[in-house]
Image: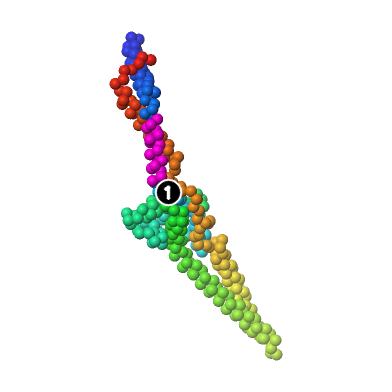
Amino acid sequence: MANNFPNNNNSSQIEDAELIDLGAIWGSVKHRWVLLLACVVIATAAAGGAWRMTPAEWKATAALQIGQLPVNPTTLIEPPAQAAERFNQRQLQDQALVSAGLPLDELKDDRTRLLRKTLKATPGKNTNFVDVSVAAHSQEDAKIYLNAAIQALIKTHDARLTPLIKNLDDRIATNNLQMAEAISEKTRLEANLKNASTSPSGGKFEPSVIAINLISKQDDLIRGLTAEHAALIDLHTKTNTFPTTIVDAIYVPERPASPKLSIFLAIGLILGALIGTILAMFLDRNRPKTAG
């Protein structure tokens, strides 16, 4: 039991020391409140000045819908996550910069640095949509830069989609040609069979059976071509095959996204209070402590 008393005394001393330190801080703050207030005012004013000197940035946003390829089953031109990752690659950024008339070297132009830094894309969850954004030093530039980046992606996707669309168009044209030939052949066979049956000598049994079998085969061929044509046309519809597009117009708010005055003032207020407290304690370091 006797061993517990020293431990209790040590704990009490630590608590007393902490109370004394807090009391000393509070005493310095009360004694030097004018200094503290001056530091807060100066730091807040400096923060306001820094806010005014910081270039404003406007943020442009848009939503993309990833297109679909003319294949069965339905396949996206590119997975949304992979499409979103393209906006982080320098190749797409370079294409956007060239389209926007900016240099590729971010060290030569702050606008280039800002585009590379703020161009971001986020894929939608379980959808074929991608949200894209970028910042610029003006509303118009933000819209131009985002459109340039989006068009760079659309150009890449069109390079994949266009050959498949052409192949689908060729298959539809071939199907139409085969359908016309099959219908023409069926019409010819039916005419020959009709002429043979109405001739004075009458149609022979064996040739008539052959003609009927050929007509039946043509019917089967026409039905197959009709089903194929319907499937090809279905692939060609806008619901199954379409390019990557902007879902809605690019949006840029009237007010800049940054810098935020409230954030600057809050930082200035905190720093001013901190600096004022430190200066007050430094100036009162030799001031005798009053008994509590």
131 with respect to 43 (left or right): right
Residue farthest to the top?
A: 2
Which segment is the magenta one? 37-53
241 with respect to 276 (left or right): right
Write the residue at 68% across / 85% down.
197
Q: Of residues 56 and 1, which is closer to you in this image?
A: 56
- The answer to whether residue 39 is magenta is yes
Write the residue at 44% across / 43% down.
260
Indicate the position of residue 56 as horizontal and vertical percent values.
42, 48
**Measured along the vertical axis of the image, is residue 2 above or below residue 270?**
above
The residue to which callout 1 is attached is 56
Indicate the position of residue 69 as horizontal and vertical percent values.
50, 62
Report the amino acid beneath label 1.
Answer: Ala
**Measured along the vertical axis of the image, is residue 19 above or below residue 135?**
above
Query: Is residue 127 visible to us here?
Result: yes
The quadrant the C terminus occupies is: top left
Q: Indicate the secondary structure of the residue bearing disc 1.
A: loop
Residue farthest to the bottom?
A: 200
The quadrant holding residue 22 is top left
Write the residue at 43% across / 36% down.
266
- The answer to whether residue 118 is magenta is no
The quadrant the N terminus occupies is: top left
